[in-house]
Amino acid sequence: SQKIEQNSEALNIQEGKTATLTCNYTNYSPAYLQWYRQDPGRGPVFLLLIRENEKEKRKERLKVTFDTTLKQSLFHITASQPADSATYLCALVRRSSASKIIFGSGTRLSIRP
Amino acid sequence: DAGITQSPRYKITETGRQVTLMCHQTWSHSYMFWYRQDLGHGLRLIYYSAAADITDKGEVPDGYVVSRSKTENFPLTLESATRSQTSVYFCASSSSGGGGTGELFFGEGSRLTVL
């Protein structure tokens, strides 16, 4: 079956460290992956995307990698801060059905001071 | 103010009743989406619309009806609510669907409880 998995429900790290979140997919041919942030009681907010022909993308303290061989995307937050605490969702856009964007269940990240 | 708004934010209803969740966006985005979010399942696509009068099913469409007579509005109706439809519903819009950046702009959600 087709699925997209974020393999940590929760991740707790010390402030200042790099947080690394994982998104794995099976049986999809993604055109690209998106990452969103969701705070409690709020809707998700788009952070960045990476296309299938890109290996890495950066935006300020955020970095995303995409390995189509491993079928995996990694999302990094460097110099993490307590304000980075939130749930992070990966979303996959398929070449075959671009409007049906599929989401993972999310990783809840907590940054302790 | 520009944006995407959902109403009501909270709704409690009873099994068998009809419920309509409203979604309105001011960006004139072509694409609009309805997702539901449940613990353990993440966001699942119910229906989406590529333009006015064009709608299509997502992963979990059963029990839901949508319409899109105007570009800015995309209501979601539960014709006969069931307990399994208790969830948080998110509406989203996009200027390009899955093409281009495909960035989705989400509303704040509508929390529905079916007793």
Image: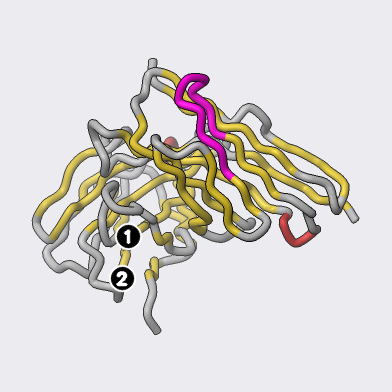
Q: CA distance from mark 2 to mark 1?
A: 7 Å
Q: Which residue is mark 2?
A: B25
Instruction: Give the mark, 2 or 1, whose residue is nearer the N terminus.
Output: 2
Q: Is residue A51 above or below residue B70?
A: above
Q: Is residue B99 left or right of residue B43?
A: left
Going by the numbered disc 1, the residue's amino acid type is Ser
Tell me which secondary structure the magenta stretch mostly adopts: strand
Residue A58 at what x, y percent from top left? 57, 52
Q: Which residue is mark 1?
A: B93
Residue situated furthest left in the rendering: B53
The magenta stretch is A64-73
Going by the numbered disc 2, the residue's amino acid type is Gln
Q: Quadrant of the N terminus of chain A?
A: top left
In this view of the protein, which residue sits in the foreground, B57 or A27?
A27
Q: Is residue B115 visible?
A: no
Name the subunit of mark 1. Answer: B
Q: In terms of secondary structure, where does tag 2 sit?
A: strand
User: What residue do we see at 39% from left, 36% from top?
Assistant: A53
Q: Mark 1: few, some, or many residues within 10 Å (few <14, many ≥20)?
A: many
Residue B10 at what x, y percent from top left? 49, 62
Residue situated furthest top in the rendering: A1
Residue B49 at what x, y percent from top left? 20, 52
The answer to whether marks 2 and 1 mark residues whose Cβ atoms lie closer than 8 Å is yes
Name the subunit of mark 2. Answer: B
Q: Is residue A60 above or below residue A4?
A: below
User: What residue do we see at 45% from left, 44% from top?
Assistant: A50
